[in-house]
């Protein structure tokens, strides 16, 4: 039975091709304009995907597989995934098509039409790189009114026996997050992130992307992402050896001109299949067993992958398609231009956008407490914020981007994913970063032209959304604090916020 095996740009894992027959089956891979432009992805993201696809195809060929690879500049390339599958069916006359469950709902809907469209048997297989299938997540979450990541994570730890001894969590606790909030210190020595040297293939792709996508966000070079599994494994190994031990303590800290901190910088590779989640989890667990990293760091890192990453994906498939339209707080403001240009006097936002343009990366707290927090308290529409986050990060695919944005930062799902909005005034940013020291605004000033805009926007956000949020027990206290403010103070919050938001 001749089979056409479709491999998408984020499915670059040998594990998905286990039963592929070298003599008989054709592996189809294509660089298509539709996927490269459905949002104007950061140039580095397109370079990463195309270069990793080309390396993966070469690797498969070397192993004896038959690969039909369509480059972006192939004159016959139709630019659409469906059309490229159609053309490949005409070329190869397969008796069936095997694809892997994709990372985005819109792609799944297209795939589900293929069998009828091509009059061919089409099998869409589970993506077994994930640790929890959409069905298993649905069975777990379906029983709960409000699922919580923490309980899901405990189930996963038990299921895979990770950091478990004698049926109990190692160290006696499931979660060591309270130990992971050290503010930034000046004299930290941070081991640099992994930097691959671009080879000939990557250089060709860089030229292609600069030529074809000149108006896309971000800088193409310098480009140092891993583009092969071997390089990605080295990146993982370096993180485990050099940064994991400090990952926990400084997980929430932000330092000016230190975009990478002690984070792993592996989401790019995990999300396209160059790394597998369980191998990252096991590498961290081993570092703890070998006494190379403390428990708070190792548990914290494992929780991100085994807990958050899987939980986020579970919510995406459980709640799509209506999740993409959710807007519980009816936020409608447009995205300020500085999210693209970095031109703002607010130093925290200036830093985070500048680093995002350069690296196609920002670490979690920059995304959550600076870029996300501002979008939340400034009432920016979920559609605009989602589009921005999907565009600018090299690790962004809708399955992981959408629940983080609509659920975690914007509270657009009304609290299904997170129990309260992560809204915060400038004092949180001041505590966890040194950004405020170089800012034109004054962090300790609460109102007036020089005051940190986060300080008044925070209260204005609570007031604007009182009817939707006041009954939430986790923020009720903030409303009591607001109610105790005098009339002049309340008026100043309103006027400063109005003036600031109008100026955007
Ligand atoms: P580390 O901090 O070292 O964490 C290790 C790994 O844990 C990451 O590589 C990632 O795979 C996983 N992880 C950690 N937190 C999360 C989370 N909340 N959701 C899913 N996985 C997580 N992550 C993406 O992969 N793609 C996105 O498009 C994306 N968009 C985000 C948008 C917002 C608003 C927020 C708040 C978070 C977003 N995240 C996203 C999650 C997280 O910020 C990134 O996974 C992380 O910054 C990647 O860097 P790292 O590899 O250095 O992660
Ligand atoms: C993100 C992306 C880009 C930029 N280009 C391609 C491509 O040319 N060919 C391809 O197969 N996949 C690409 N991808 C990844 C897809 O967008 C991704 O597979 C879907 O969004 C589902 O997650
Ligand atoms: Fe950001 Fe406010 Fe600090 Fe400036 S003062 S860096 S705007 S939090």
Image: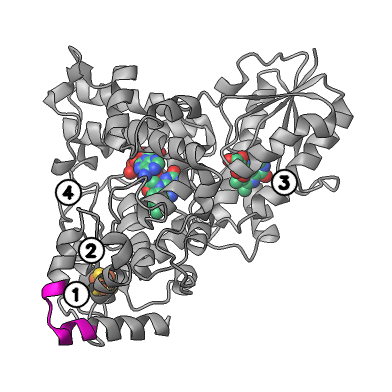
Of the numbered discs 4 and 2, the one sitting upstream in the chain is: 4
Region rendered in magenta = 483-492
Using a 10 Å C-alpha cutoff, classify the residue at mark 3 as few (fewer than 14 neighbours), some (14 to 19) or many (20 or more): many
Is any part of residue 68 visible from this angle?
yes
- Residue assigned mark 1: 443
Residue drawn at the location 41% of the way across and 85% of the way down: 503
- Residue assigned mark 4: 181
Q: Looking at the image, do the residues carrying marks 4 and 2 touch, with CB atoms under 8 Å apart? A: no
Label 3: which secondary element: loop
Which mark is on residue 32? Answer: 3
In the image shown, does 345 or 495 lie closer to the viewer? 495
Q: Position of residue 412 (x, y in %)?
A: 41, 56
Of the numbered discs 1 and 2, the one sitting upstream in the chain is: 2
Marks counted in the figure total: 4
* Magenta span contains residue 113: no
Predominant SS along the magenta part: helix
Using a 10 Å C-alpha cutoff, classify the residue at mark 2 as few (fewer than 14 neighbours), some (14 to 19) or many (20 or more): many
Residue drawn at the location 35% of the way across and 86% of the way down: 499
Label 1: which secondary element: loop
Asked whether mark 2 lies closer than 8 Å to ligand 3, one says yes
Label 2: which secondary element: helix
Label 4: which secondary element: loop
Q: CA distance from mark 1 to mark 3?
A: 47 Å
Q: CA distance from mark 4 to mark 1?
A: 20 Å
């Amino acid at each position: 039975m001749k089979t056409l095996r479709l491999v998408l740009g984020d499915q670059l894992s040998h594990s998905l091709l286990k039963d592929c027959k070298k003599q008989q089956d054709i592996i189809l891979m294509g660089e298509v304009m539709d996927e490269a432009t459905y949002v104007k992805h950061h140039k580095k993201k397109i370079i990463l995907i195309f270069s990793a696809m080309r390396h993966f195809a070469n690797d498969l060929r070397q192993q004896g597989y038959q690969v039909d690879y369509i480059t972006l500049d192939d004159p016959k390339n139709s630019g659409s995934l469906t059309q490229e599958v159609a053309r490949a069916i005409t070329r190869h006359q397969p008796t069936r098509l095997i694809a892997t469950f994709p990372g985005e709902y819109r792609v799944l809907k297209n795939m589900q039409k293929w069998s009828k469209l091509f009059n061919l048997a089409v099998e869409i297989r589970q993506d077994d790189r994930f640790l929890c299938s959409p069905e298993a997540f649905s069975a777990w979450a379906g029983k709960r009114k409000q699922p919580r990541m923490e309980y899901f994570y405990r189930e996963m730890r038990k299921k895979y026996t990770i950091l478990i001894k004698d049926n109990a969590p190692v160290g006696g606790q499931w979660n060591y997050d309270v130990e992971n909030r050290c503010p930034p210190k000046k004299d930290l020595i941070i081991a640099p992130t992994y930097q691959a040297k671009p080879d000939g293939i990557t250089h060709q792709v860089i030229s292609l992307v600069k030529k074809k996508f000149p108006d896309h966000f971000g800088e193409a070079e310098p480009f140092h992402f891993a583009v092969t599994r071997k390089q990605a494994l080295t990146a993982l190994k370096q993180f485990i050896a050099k940064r994991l031990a400090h990952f926990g303590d400084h997980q929430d800290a932000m330092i000016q001109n230190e975009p990478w901190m002690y984070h792993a910088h592996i989401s790019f590779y995990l999300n396209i299949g160059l790394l597998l989640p369980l191998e990252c989890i096991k590498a961290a667990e081993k570092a703890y067993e070998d006494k190379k990293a403390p428990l708070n760091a190792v548990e914290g890192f494992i929780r991100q992958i085994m807990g958050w990453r899987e939980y986020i994906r579970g919510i995406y498939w459980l709640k799509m398609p209506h999740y993409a339209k959710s807007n519980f707080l009816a936020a409608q403001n447009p995205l300020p231009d500085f999210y693209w240009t970095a031109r703002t006097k607010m130093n925290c936002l200036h830093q985070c956008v500048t680093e995002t343009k350069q690296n196609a990366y920002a670490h979690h707290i920059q995304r959550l407490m600076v870029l996300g927090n501002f979008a939340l308290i400034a009432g920016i529409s979920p559609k605009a914020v989602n589009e921005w986050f999907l565009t600018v990060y090299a690790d962004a695919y809708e399955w992981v981007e959408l629940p983080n944005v609509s659920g975690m930062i914007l509270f657009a799902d009304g609290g299904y994913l997170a129990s309260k909005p992560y809204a915060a005034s400038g004092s949180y940013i001041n505590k966890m970063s040194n950004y405020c020291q170089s800012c034109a605004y004054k962090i300790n000033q609460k109102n007036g032209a020089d005051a940190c805009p986060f300080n008044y926007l925070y209260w204005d956000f609570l007031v604007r959304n009182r009817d939707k949020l006041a009954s939430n027990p986790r923020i009720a206290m903030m409303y009591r604090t607001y109610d105790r403010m005098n009339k002049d103070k309340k008026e100043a919050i309103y006027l400063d916020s109005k003036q600031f938001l109008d100026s955007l």
